[in-house]
Amino acid sequence: MRVHHLNCTTIHTNLPYPGVTHCLLIEGEDSLTLVDTGFGIRDYASPSRHVELFTRVNGIPRDIDETAVSKVTKLGFKPEDIRRIVLTHLHLDHVGGVVDFPWGEVHVLKTEFESAINPRKWGSSPPAQEKIVGVVCERLEIQV
């Protein structure tokens, strides 16, 4: 097994150092697994109002080269090689790239999923709810 560390978003806030959205690409014996996806190509090329606001407030340059699909390709893999996507949590800057890997099986913890679809109960943000309900729901494999 080999693990690649990917910077899938650079965040330029008022801190003295930039932040990143860290994703992992795990080479298994027979397939690739992506842990988090960062923002996706669509988020940068045609951002929703939530993504537009989030990227502007956080100083994110919306660089297509920092998307997971671009990083995977630069490592010499095809995006279709991604068979599993594990989402650590459902914030916009961690799930947007899911749409760039439509053949990947998506995994997320049940409590994280429930917090995204029931924001009043769990305190999740409306942008996370919009992203999950609108794009990811039908592909989730909920892990307990």
Image (cartoon, rainbow, N blue to C red):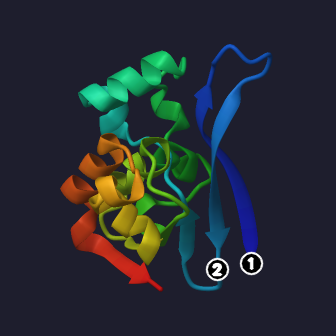
Where does residue 103 sit, x and y in percent of width and height? 32, 70
Which residue is found at the position 35% from the left and 68% from the top? 114
Which residue is found at the position 51% from the left and 58% from the top? 89
Where does residue 99 sit, x and y in percent of width and height? 31, 54
Residue on which disc 2 sits: 28
Q: Earlier in the sequence, mark 1 or mark 2?
A: 1
Q: Is residue 103 above or below residue 45?
A: below
Residue on which disc 1 sits: 1
Q: Tell whether 21 sits left or right of 142.
A: right
- Local packing at callout 1 (Cα closer than 10 Å; few below 14, some 14-19, many 20+) is few
* Image quadrant in which the N terminus is located: bottom right
Give whichever of 98, 12 is nearer the camera: 12
Q: Secondary structure under badge 1?
A: loop
At label 1, the amino acid type is Met
Q: Is residue 50 above or below residue 31?
A: above
Q: Is residue 2 visible?
A: yes
Q: Secondary structure under badge 2?
A: loop
Give whichever of 117, 44 is nearer the camera: 117
Residue at the farthest front position: 121
- Local packing at callout 2 (Cα closer than 10 Å; few below 14, some 14-19, many 20+) is few
The reply to whether the C-beta atoms of the residues labelled 1 and 2 are less than 8 Å apart is yes
Where does residue 56 sit, x and y in percent of width and height? 44, 16
At label 2, the amino acid type is Gly
Q: Tell whether 32 sits left or right of 47.
A: right
The Cα–Cα distance between marks 1 and 2, rounded to whole angstroms, is 5 Å
